[in-house]
Image (spheres, rainbow, N blue to C red):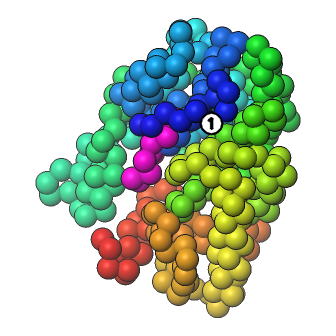
């Protein structure tokens, strides 16, 4: 974990993007302190707290969750007594998160397990989902929320459903900083859950319009506005490639095999293309933005795509 000062009293805690769940966090070290996103399990969140302890005099009194995915909020319980702030949809979706099921998946990859389970368990092996008590938001908002932290203006802006329904940007206008949560994956292939291409692209455009000098992505290294611009181009590209393949009647896996990722092949986890083609198909079938995703099927297809590419 690497702590970087990105503005006066403003920090990013970055985890190297080595795969699933290696997310980033932020700290506004003013007015009682505000942490933007906790980590996926208690050991990683304890390390996050130790890292912030280098600069804070006491633990932050506020936590913002940029969205509902566990790698941004399953460490909430370690901020005892903190106000936890998120979008209403993040609060509503909290109950769908399931650390015990994740721990069971993590433990299911032993000898004799099928190769897909072994790969999935391997991706989870450095996490420990035991003892997590889901700790949902105590304060929710709808469109935006302004908070002042001892002279620092913080604006929370709802931009979902993009990556998820409750996506929030955290904008610090004076510092020219945006914490983007998983609206932005940097040099890392995005995954989306409940949301639409149009709304995700609009959310990326919103980041650019805020004219930040530093953008902290949910995953991957710090960037400027080139980050959201490049990810927007990826989304446009995949949506455009998927449409004719859908019209030819190709299943998602066959479509993915035919898409040349070009410059995006070098982003981490390129097989997440499956998620993005599946989202394009969902829209082409006129299904709702929050139609249930069959996770096992998607991860199986990702595994098959990796095998096809010779990477399994
Ligand atoms: Zn994430």
Snapshot quadrant of residue 195: bottom right
Left or right of 11? Residue 138 is right
Q: Position of residue 252 (x, y in %)?
A: 55, 76
Query: Which quarter of the figure is the C terminus placed in?
Result: bottom left
* SS assignment at label 1: strand
- Kindly identify the residue that appears in the image at 62 percent across and 12 percent down: 61
Query: Which quarter of the figure is the N terminus placed in?
Result: top left
Residue that label 1 marks: 6
Left or right of 100? Residue 58 is right
Left or right of 254? Residue 242 is right
Q: Is residue 223 above or below residue 146?
A: below
Residue 211 in view (yes/no): yes
Q: Position of residue 69 (x, y in %)?
A: 56, 41
Q: Residues within 10 Å of mark 1 (few under 14, many from 20)?
A: some
Q: Position of residue 125 (x, y in %)?
A: 28, 45
Asked whether 41 or 16 is in front, the reply is 16
Query: For the view shown, which residue lies furthest in the front direction?
Result: 8
Residue 93 in view (yes/no): no
Find out whether residue 20 is within the magenta segment.
Answer: yes
- Kindly identify the residue that appears in the image at 14 percent across and 54 percent down: 111
Asked whether 147 or 85 is in front, the reply is 147
Ligand 1's quadrant: top right
Snapshot quadrant of residue 129: top left
Main SS category, magenta section: loop
- Kindly identify the residue that appears in the image at 49 percent across and 40 percent down: 14
Q: Is residue 95 above or below residue 297?
A: above
- Kindly identify the residue that appears in the image at 80 percent across and 17 percent down: 151
Q: Is residue 56 above or below residue 125?
A: above
Q: Position of residue 285 (x, y in %)?
A: 72, 72
Query: For the view shown, which residue lies furthest in the left direction?
Result: 111
Q: Which residues are magenta?
A: 13-22
């Amino acid at each position: 974990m690497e702590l970087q000062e990105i503005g006066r009293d403003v920090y990013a805690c970055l985890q190297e993007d080595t795969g699933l769940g290696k997310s980033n966090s932020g700290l506004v070290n003013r007015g009682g302190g505000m942490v933007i996103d906790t980590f996926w399990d208690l050991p990683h969140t304890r390390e996050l707290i130790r890292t912030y302890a280098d600069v804070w005099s006491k633990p932050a009194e506020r936590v913002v969750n940029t969205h509902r995915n566990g790698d941004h909020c399953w460490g909430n319980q370690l901020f005892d007594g903190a106000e936890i702030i998120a979008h209403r949809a993040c609060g509503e979706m909290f109950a769908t998160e399931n650390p015990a099921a994740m721990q069971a998946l993590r433990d299911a990859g032993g000898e004799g397990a099928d190769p897909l389970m072994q790969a999935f368990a391997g991706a989870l092996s450095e996490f420990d989902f035991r003892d997590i008590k889901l700790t949902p938001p105590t304060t929710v908002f709808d469109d935006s929320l302004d908070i002042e932290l001892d002279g620092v203006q913080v604006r929370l802006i709802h931009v979902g459903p993009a990556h998820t329904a409750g996506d929030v940007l955290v904008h610090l206008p004076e510092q020219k900083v945006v914490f983007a949560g998983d609206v932005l994956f940097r040099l890392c292939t995005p995954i989306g859950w409940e949301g639409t291409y149009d709304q995700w692209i609009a959310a990326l455009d919103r980041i650019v319009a805020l004219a930040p000098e530093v953008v902290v992505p949910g995953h991957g290294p710090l960037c400027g506005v080139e980050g959201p611009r490049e990810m927007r181009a990826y989304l446009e590209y995949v949506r455009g490639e998927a449409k004719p393949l859908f019209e030819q009647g190709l299943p998602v896996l066959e479509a993915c095999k035919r898409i040349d990722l070009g410059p995006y092949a070098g982003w981490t986890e390129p097989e997440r293309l499956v998620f993005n083609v599946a989202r394009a198909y969902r829209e082409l079938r006129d299904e709702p933005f929050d139609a249930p995703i069959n996770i096992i099927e998607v991860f199986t297809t990702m595994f098959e795509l990796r095998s096809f590419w010779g990477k399994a």
